[in-house]
Amino acid sequence: MKRIDSPDVPLRRGDSILISGDYQHRARIDGFRVQRFWHAEKERMVRKFSAPAPGDRVLDIGCGSGVIANVLASMGAVTTGIDANPAAVDYARRTFKQANLDFRVGHVEEIDVPDATVDGVYCLELIEHIYEHQVRELFSALNRVCRVGGKLTITTPNYSGVWPFLERALDTLRLVPRLDGDQHVTRFTRTRLRRLLEDTNWQVDVLTTFSTVAPFASLLGWNFAERVAAMEDDLDLRFGNILFAVDRKRR
């Protein structure tokens, strides 16, 4: 999947600010408690709703420092993590070593994988970093590389919920690398995400939200926050912070 950048059809090939290669892993293990729980929630949602089977061939697109790719490999999947940030890929290669795990540098337009050879693809907090036409092309390309019935797992901020207020607070207080404009350029809602997935031949099996109250509840105890997270799953909060979709390739 390749495009030539032009003024009429721009490509976004990275954030406008430098993100350190170890960012996601450091946030997961050494961050403030709320931040650690926030990143742990992605692992929990994958395990609960879209865990790969042992031996599955899976891709982690936008793998960052390799945390989720390592989790997928630990579940027995033959996993390739792909990211446009060479520093992140270098960190992942040095940090996570499993026989069924490898990492590659690549942009979303450069996924060099044979058609119909992949059982599952994971794109966690990636699609808000690129333009909508790039997301459409990415979804189409991932549909081609997946086998019939293969799954695509997506997470992205929910801009029809309370996320915009949280993003503004994070940027104002400078608690994370600046999000609005520097990192996030496309704003998804349930409706917008579902339409884009269905237009690119994906059947949406799960579309819910997570990480709304639970990460902040972790200040009162990790186990308590896990119970809150499970309640959020049952309630399927429309205003939840992060959208979570599991999609299946149609015939």
Image (spheres, grey):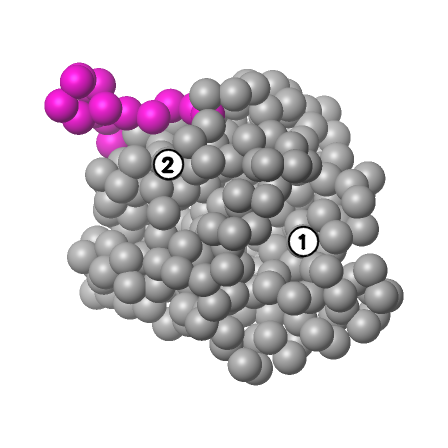
Tell me the residue at 50%/74% (across/down).
237
Q: Distance between the residues labelled 2 and 1?
A: 21 Å
Q: Position of residue 167 (x, y in %)?
A: 53, 45
Give, as a single range, the part of the protein colored magenta: 1-15
Q: Position of residue 218 (x, y in %)?
A: 79, 62
* Quadrant of the image containing the N terminus: top left
The residue that label 1 is drawn on is 38
**The furthest residue to the left:** 8
- In front here: 166 or 138? 166
* Quadrant of the image containing the C terminus: bottom left
The quarter of the picture where residue 186 lies is top left
Q: Does the magenta stretch include residue 5?
A: yes
- In front here: 166 or 214? 166
Q: Position of residue 228 (x, y in %)?
A: 70, 74
Disc 1 is placed on an element classified as helix
The residue that label 2 is drawn on is 185
Q: Where is residue 156 in the image (x, y as percent from the top left)?
A: 46, 51
Answer few, some or many: residues within 10 Å of disc 2's Cα (few below 14, many 20 plus, some between 14 and 19): some
